[in-house]
Amino acid sequence: MKNPQTLMATAILATLTFITSITGADPLPSWNDGVARQSIIDFVEKVTKEGEPEFIPVPELIAVFDNDGTLWPENPVPFQLAFGLDSLTLQLTSKPEMKNDAFVMAALAGDNTKLLADHYKGLFHILGLTHAGMTTDEFDQRVNAWMKTAKHPRFGQTYDQCIYQPMHEVLAYLRANGFKTFIVSGGGADFMRVWSERVYGIPPEQVVGSRGGVKFEIREGKPVLLKTLEDVFVDDKAGKPVGIHQIIGRRPVMAFGNSDGDKEMLEYTTIGNPHASFGLIVHHTDAEREYAYDANPKSSGKLIEALADAPKRGWTVVRMKDDWKTIFPAK
Amino acid sequence: MKNPQTLMATAILATLTFITSITGADPLPSWNDGVARQSIIDFVEKVTKEGEPEFIPVPELIAVFDNDGTLWPENPVPFQLAFGLDSLTLQLTSKPEMKNDAFVMAALAGDNTKLLADHYKGLFHILGLTHAGMTTDEFDQRVNAWMKTAKHPRFGQTYDQCIYQPMHEVLAYLRANGFKTFIVSGGGADFMRVWSERVYGIPPEQVVGSRGGVKFEIREGKPVLLKTLEDVFVDDKAGKPVGIHQIIGRRPVMAFGNSDGDKEMLEYTTIGNPHASFGLIVHHTDAEREYAYDANPKSSGKLIEALADAPKRGWTVVRMKDDWKTIFPAK
């Protein structure tokens, strides 16, 4: 008799095949035919067929996705920044004395220079007001309340409706083929974990992000975790492979990003990987339906290096205007 | 037509039921009948039956296990310490000048006082020689080589053969019922992730442990992660709920431990949890087949507090001598 694990694997594989057959042949219906779409399918097919030279065992099918600019937009400001600013505005209504706080007023006026001066003093002050000094449960409630009501200024929908439908299909396609999908984002892990499972089908334990500290305390006889600004970890640039190592503990075989924040993650995934590997960059070329930019505004408009590196690294470049039939899910 | 997710869930549930039926009625054959064994089964049955008042949805069936003393022994010394000492001995054969290193000689002589003095100066020096200053790949190779050859001084087997068979059955039983099983250990994450999947069926991304830093570097054109002693995180005591939050991002519903290092993890899991929850402590009562101790040698022989707290918290206490038919897997 076969052992239970083998039986289980066989039954699950049969189920997957069945689902593929009933859902039709096209796993990526929002993608136009083209090099980008085909490169995803070719890679998945070659690494998931047992017996093929580039076959990768299921446990090592790890795919990592940047979030801002890769799974949803990062304009006009990163969505978590919109949350922070809305949170400040809300606090201001109940505590009008906050008007005397120069950093709060600078944040609301978009005066980044003031916030970043003196070793990010203002930024940390704002983070302290919006992302710390409360329990993780309280923070989750704030994020949930904001996500239910706040609307994207251009698209007029809640932020969690502004996700890229074509990338959503990639997530589902990879999972149906045995991949484990992770977010690896410069955004806050605590912010994303509140909605990642509902919105992307990615559970909290598969979300890697920036973080502050948490402190275990017993309050009124019950354990809580208090959010602090100690031990801040920034999961961006060279921090992304570090975050991947700390949380996932093994090297991904697919990486999806869109900016210089993703360059090291793409390198870590695709250069010198003992397995076959795949890198993809979402290039924002669609001013009409989304945004168009190929320079990094944070680095004085310098061309996004990761995008410049794509040809020599063999990374797929998705041109949103040409490669995506639709940008957002149908209402 | 049902959507693919529903079909998939239905098919997987059917598979699980099928597997349970073919593998027979007893999921915990190495456990004697008794309160401890029954408490595990009762909890799993009540939270996994849809429609029951204490039902917990599959994604939230998170179970966390301490490692040293819970999944394998921690005597005569924690196994990772044995690895560190063997690693020093090995280095000494190729670098005899290390004999002049007072901390190395103190470590090999078991002189903990010298290592812990002056803010753990000696301990960090030893960690620097055995757990840092190399790439993660090099460290993995060292751990693998050690695990293949080193033998436990009393049991005469490789360390990865000295795992508790009854706990192994609990891991498999929980997974067959939809739980995701995690290690949450004071031991090093990098050390455990090398073998956790092979030995326990727990993949690296489900291992939470202590850690040093890693630094992303390109060496000879290829990305590597260099192990450092910066940003050391100790995943023990109040650090365990912190580690759980950072890596898993949600509250477990089952926790298994054996020492004061696990007390806060047990509290975080079982006090004020909106879901039904379960805590278990392995009590080492079997001097003949394993070890017997109910005091914490690190705290001058003080009774293990977590064990003392068990009755008032409703935590299950496993008495190894009475509750376990066998300790280790059959050879």
Image (cartoon, coloured by chain):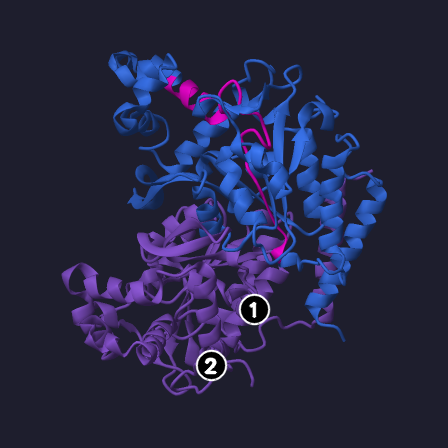
Chain colours: A blue, B purple
Badge 1 marks a residue whose secondary structure is helix
Q: Quadrant of the C terminus of chain A?
A: top right
Indicate the position of residue B288 as horizontal and vertical percent values: 39, 87
Where, by quadrant of the figure, is residue B108 drawn?
bottom left
Asked which secondary structure carries label 2, the reply is helix
Span of residues in magenta: A60-88
Disc 1: CA contacts within 10 A as few (<14), some (14-19) or many (>=20)? few
Which is nearer the eye, B278 or A68?
A: A68
Residue A73 is a magenta residue: yes
Q: Quadrant of residue A226?
A: top left
Residue B330 at x, y percent in the picture: 56, 84
Spot occupied by residue A254 in the image (x, y as percentages of width and height):
62, 46
Give the residue at mark 1.
B198
Q: Which residue corresponds to mark 2?
A: B149
- Tell me the subunit letter for badge 1: B
Vertically, is A219 above or below B73? above
Q: Residue shown at 43%/83% (left/top)?
A: B151
Q: Name which of mark 1 and mark 2 comes first in the sequence.
A: 2
Name the front one of labels 1 and 2: 2
Q: Is residue A63 above or below residue A147?
A: below
Residue drawn at point x = 37 percent, y = 49 percent: B242
Q: Are marks 1 and 2 on the same chain?
A: yes
Residue B253 or A235: which is nearer the viewer? Answer: A235
Residue B54 visible to the viewer: no
Whole-angstrom CA distance, mark 1 to mark 2, is 16 Å
Say which chain tag 2 marks: B
**Residue B62 shown in magenta:** no
**A243 shown above or below B125:** above
Q: Can residue B276 be seen in this snapshot?
A: yes
